[in-house]
Every structure is written in structure tokens, then in C-alpha cells.
Image (spheres, rainbow, N blue to C red):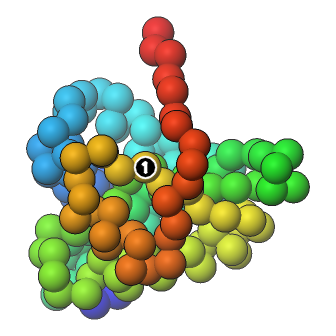
Amino acid sequence: MSVRRAQESDLDALMRLGQRYCAADRAAWVPERARLGFLGLLHDDDNGVVLVCEAADEVIGYAVLTWGWSIECGGRESLLDEMYVDEPGQGYGSELLEAVVAAAKEHGAARVFLETEAANADARDFWLKRGFEIEDSVWLQRRW
């Protein structure tokens, strides 16, 4: 198993895995948005990075790490926007997560945020076992 920075040649695999991620998360899959989102991160690190996890020369997982800026943390912070592995329970997710944290540190981020769905206790258990803490904030959004 290996983890590397995604390239544009990985786009088809990312789209396939992204659709599976949305199905598992019960989220809407909008291919046009996903394609634009991935492409905006594959050419440079200005907005974030996409990492892929490979086993037997096949992309079996990915993680999307994006940048934000925070006065509270004194600069760059990061958001683990999406992470998905086709073969859970094999240790691939843990290795991919370590690569995510390393990439965040390498790019000067002071912390990594992520969100889980309220009903997804298994995901929270995964993150908590790997050093993440539940925060006392509530995220809100406004769409347009």
C-alpha cells in the first residue's frame, strides 16, 4: 500500500470513489461539481491537496485536504473535506490519515478539522481513536 499526491490522470478513479463516498455518506452526488472540485486541487497546492491510496497498482482510496485561515490558530488551518477507502478494516484509512496529517504540517497548517454526520458514530470512533477531539462548536451553512 502506498499514498501519494493525486494527479490529473487519477481523475476517473477519484470520480468513481467520490460517488461511492457520497453513497456511503447518503449525500447527493453531483458529478459536475465533483469534477470541478477535484480539478481545482490537482494542479497546485494553493487551495489544498488530494492524496490517493494505492494497493496492487489500483487507487482504492482518497483524501481531500483544503486550506483555510484562522486568527484563532494564527494562520493556516486545514479541513479534511473528504476521505474514503474502498476496503475498510485493512489499515488503509489509518495510513491515509497519517499522510493527511503530514501534508497539513508540511503546508504550515496548525490543525486539521473534519466533520462527521451526527448519526455516524462509527466514523467518530475512528477519528477519536486517532487523536481527534470533539469540539464544542456547531457548524452552520448558507447555500446559494
Determine whether the residue tagged by mark 1 lies in a helix, strand or loop: loop
Up/down of 37 relative to 86, above or below: above
Choose top left, top right, bottom left or bottom right for residue 33.
Answer: top left
From the viewer's perspective, tell me whether residue 44 is left or right of residue 9. Answer: right
Give 26 or 103, whichever is nearer the viewer. Answer: 26
Choose top left, top right, bottom left or bottom right for residue 39.
Answer: top left
Circle 1: residue type: Glu
User: Which residue: 46% across, 15% down?
Assistant: 143
Give 88 or 52, whichever is nearer the viewer. Answer: 88
- Which residue is tagged 1? 115
Give 123 or 87, whichever is nearer the viewer. Answer: 123
Q: Position of residue 117 (x, y in %)?
A: 30, 45
How many numbered marks are there? 1
User: Which residue: 39% across, 62% down?
Assistant: 63
Q: Is residue 18 visible?
A: yes
Q: Position of residue 115 (x, y in %)?
A: 43, 49
Q: Quadrant of the N terminus?
A: bottom left
From the viewer's perspective, tell me whether residue 113 is left or right of residue 95. Answer: right
From the viewer's perspective, tell me whether residue 23 is left or right of residue 4. Answer: left
Q: Residue furthest front?
A: 136
Q: Is residue 42 visible?
A: no
